[in-house]
Structure formats: structure tokens, C-alpha cells
Image: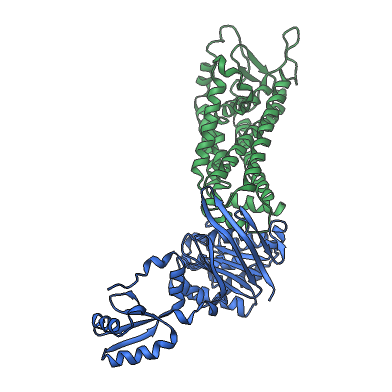
Amino acid sequence: MWTLIQIELFKIFRRPRTYIAFAAITGLIGIIQFGLKLDGDSYVEFMMRDITSSITVEGKVLNGYQVCYICLQVLLVHVPLLIALVAADMISGEANMGTLRIMLTKPISRTKFLLAKFTATVAYTLMLLVWLAILALFVNMILFGTDDLFLLKSEYVVLLKKDDIFWRYVWAFGFAALAMITVASLGFLFSLFAENSIGPIVATMSVIIFFTILSTLNIPVFNKIKPFLFTTHMIGWKEFFDIKVNSNNEAIIGSIQNPQKIINSALVLLLHIVGFVGASIWIFKKKDVLS
Amino acid sequence: MQPIVTVTGLTKQFKNITAVQDLSFSVNEGDVYGFLGQNGAGKSTTIRMLLTLIEPTNGSIEIFGKELHAHRNEILSEIGAVIEKPDVYKYLSAYENLKLFARLSNVKVTEQKLMEQLDKVGLAHRAKDTVKTFSQGMKQRLGIAIALVHDPRLIILDEPTNGLDPQGIADIRNLILHLSRDLKKTVIVSSHLLSEIEQVATRMLIIDKGKKIIEGNAADLFDPAQTIVELQTFDNAYALQQLQLSGWANHLQTRRDTAVLIKLDRQLIPKLHRDLVDMDIQVLSLQPRHSLEDYFLQVTSGNQHVDTYTN
């Protein structure tokens, strides 16, 4: 199994397409960093325009933690596309090249073959998120320094102390990894049904867009299905940045407002992953390879 | 001789299409087994079932005396295959492709061994080049190197000469003969071209529309009573007319612009020769055509190409 995973990783990282995602993330974060470095004060002024009359914020609002939060808000919506580029190509790409039939004439069980491919896809997804973390968190901490994190929610503001932030990002990236692996497993499932990767990539993105629209529409008839859509739970990473307050309305350092919500979202995502991968194995074991 | 492959009642149904129907055959150890049929006859489907790429609807396959699906990995570890086009990873080099597939076959080979393998198929000098720069023939040779890298007992080649130039076709033919005669391997080779198979096969199976037409030794498929001779004269129309008048009408088989085809028992050829001389027909050539090819065309869907001669 380890040999298979090594081979799959070798193949992933020898393909030029793999690096598009890394380049895209580098470029996008670079642009955000460039823009905020150049005109960050105006951005903060615009962000705080509605509350400056009632709240006085001291310190450096536009710090590394703040920029990282901005980056994640912007990028985690688009990273699924970059994940789908590779995940939805894992089987369909092999079928398109004609290598699937050669691979499957080797003495490897189909289940092991599929699990090795999925593991490699997960490894790629995690590497992409580590790269995102390096650029969005660590580089921004160096470029913009660190200070308290000031977040504007729809009905309230959250102020997280400088020393109470880093661990939240670690967990947020961990949760984002779970969300992205869900996307990867969906793309992986779709890749079984096509002999070129365009179809599965478009199908994966279409499902995400469709479900995201359903998740965000505030129409009562859709509210019953929202909890079952994985897209509803993909933004669960934001929950790590909501803090509990005591009876005096003082923030409790090291707390999370609604940890159960995070656990529930994580479970829903995990169930989706298990479901998508299980379905992939079931279908692939029966699949006639005609490519 | 011990059968190495035994196929019994193999059937594959794709929705409303029966690609292979109740097919039974056996391949003996050491055979070069020619698998013949026109395009769409069911050859590739059968070969893919032998390699577990397609699940049979019915029937059983035993290879090396073991049931294929129960001993899949054990059996596949002793099979090398090239299926239609020799597709490999175009963004990897020939050496990387060979190493990758050797590892998948659970073979630990040194760099020297891999280079020797590439040298055998004439690719050692291009070992480090990416496959996307290779010609079709080079890709085919790399595909064969991959099929042989784990020293398999049984080699399955599905349409191995597709897209190759005459030199490439001759190379494949020589390779099959080398594998069989020198290395004592069993080879199953499929093709829709009889001319390729007949030069290498010791046994043959002809299938048409998914059904077995005949299986046997190549020599046995030749029926001396079904010989077709090709007659070329200065005036074919005159020759035809004379042959009809002199009792050969029932033997006239097909109409061609440049020749007259006569179907007869091989023993009647001397008499035909004498009659032609007696009729003062100026013969340019009189030679038996390849009866096996005609047989192949007659027993497969190709028989529509043969027009029975009518005056």
C-alpha cells in the first residue's frame, strides 16, 4: 500500500497541472498582501466605518492575524476549484491517458488501488492547505506583525487577544482541511464516471455552487435540507473565532462560543467523506474498464 | 500439453449488446495463440475479461490451473500485457515509466536491470527522455518492455501492431517468435489481420460477432478441398468464357478485374493447368491464393466481400 501511495504522489507531483493550484494561491495571497501593504489603512477605515462612533480600537488592527482571516475568507471559497483540478482527474485522467487499464492488470486489488489514489489526493489537499497556511498566516505575521484580532460579525464584534489567536488558526486550518477533503472525495467519486477530467471538475464545482446557493438562501422550504448539505458545514472553521463571554460580558480566554456546532459540522463532513469514498470503492470494484 | 488458460462458456452482455457469447477455448503452455476476428468481433472484450478489466456476465476463466477471480493477484503477477495502444505516462521518462510499473508488479529491479530491459527494446539511448517525445513505435516498444519487466509466464498482446510501420510490425513479429522459441513463454496475440497471426501462431481461434467460429492448429484450418487459385491471363474475359464452356463453371468463384478466381480441390490444379493449355489461353500466372485468408473472410463477417461469380 505504501508503495502505491508513493507512486501516486510521484505521479501527482510530476504533473505540471499540480502546481497551478500552488501558483494560484501564491498569486492571490501576494495580491492581497500587496494591496493591504499599499493601502491597508483605507481598507481598515472602510471596514470600521459603521462602528468608529461607538467603539475606539487601540493597537494595530491590520496585523498578520487580521490579514490571514481576510485571506481565508476570500480563498477558502475558491480553493475547492483548485482541489477539484487534481481530485477529479485522479481516475478520469488515467482513463483518458489509457494508463488505467495497464495499472489494473497489475497484481493490486482495486480497493487498494483506489484507496492509494485517495490517500495521495488527501496528501495533495493537505500540502495545498499547508502552503496556504505558510503564506496566509506565517508570511503575514512577518509582513504585518501580530496584535489582537478584531472581527466584525453581523450582530456583534469579536476581539481576540493576541495570545489567544494562533491555536485557533491551527484548528481552523485543520477544519478547512476536512472541508477540502470532502470536496476532494466528491471530485474523486465523479472521476470514476468519465474518461476525461473536464466533466468531473465541472460536475464537482456545479454541485458545490448549487449546494452553496441552497445553503445561503433564506427560504424556509430549503431550511430543512440545509443541515444535510456539506456546503453548509464547510465554513465551520469560522466558529473557532467566536469566543464565549461570562456574565459580565467579558471574553473567556481560550474558549469557543459553540464547540458542539463545530463537532457536528465535522461529523457531517466526515460522513460525507466516508460516503463518497465508500461509494467510489463500491462502484469501482464493479466497473468494467473499457478505456 | 497442459492448458495454461481454460475459458468455458464465457459471455459478456453490455445492456442490449452481446459482445461475447458462450466462448470456450484453451491455450496450452508454450503456445503462440492467435486470436483472430474482425474489428468488433469481441477479441478485446475477451482479452479484457482475461485480465480482469471486464467482469464476465457468465462463464469461467482458469489461468495456471486456478480460477481467475479467486486468485486474481497471484495470476496477474505472472501475466504481462499490452492492450491495444501502449499508453504510458507521457510526462514521465521511459526509465521512470518502466521503474514505476516494475514496482507495481512487485519486482525490485536495479537501475542496471531496467536499462538492460530498455536496451532489449532499443530504447536505452532515450531512457531519460519524456515519453511525449516518442513515436508510436517507440511507445509500443516501451509498452512491451513494461509487459516483460517482471518476467511473466503468459504474455497477452492485444492488437500489438496497430499504428506501426512495416519495420515496427516485423519487430513485433520477431519479438513474439523470440519470446516463444527462445524464452519458452506462452503468448496470446490478437489481431484482425490474418497475415500477422499466421506467421507466428501455433494455434488459432477465430471469433465472429462474439462467437467462436473455429479453434485449432493453424495447419488444421487449412482445407485442401477449399483451395482458391488465382488465374491471370492476357484476356481474362476470354478465359472466363472458355472455362465456363469447358466444365469449370461451378468452380468459378469470384470476379476480379485483374484475375479469375477458381475454387477447387488442390488435386485438380494439374488438370486445370492442362485444360488452360488445351484451350489456348495465354496464362500469365496461376497460383494458389492463401486459402486460410479466404477461409477467414468466409467464416467471419468479411464474407460479404466475396461475390459469387454469376455470368
* Viewer-side residue, A233 vs B206: B206
* Viewer-side residue, A230 vs B257: B257
Residue B275 lies, in percent from the top left, at 32, 90
Q: Is residue A163 left or right of residue B52?
A: right
* Viewer-side residue, B220 vs A178: B220
Q: Is residue A209 left or right of residue B308?
A: right
Residue shown at 66% from the left, 35% from the top: A275
Residue B311 to residue A64: above or below: below
Residue B11 to residue B266: above or below: above
* Image chain in blue: B
The answer, for residue B230, to whether it is visible in the render is yes
The answer, for residue B167, to whether it is visible in the render is no
Residue shown at 65% from the left, 40% from the top: A277
Residue B136 lies, in percent from the top left, at 47, 65
Q: Colour of chain A?
A: green
Q: Is residue A37 left or right of residue B50?
A: left
Residue A263 to residue A154: above or below: below
Locate residue B120: give its quadrant. bottom right
Residue shown at 46% from the left, 81% from the top: B225
Residue B49 lies, in percent from the top left, at 60, 58
Locate residue B302: give its quadrant. bottom left
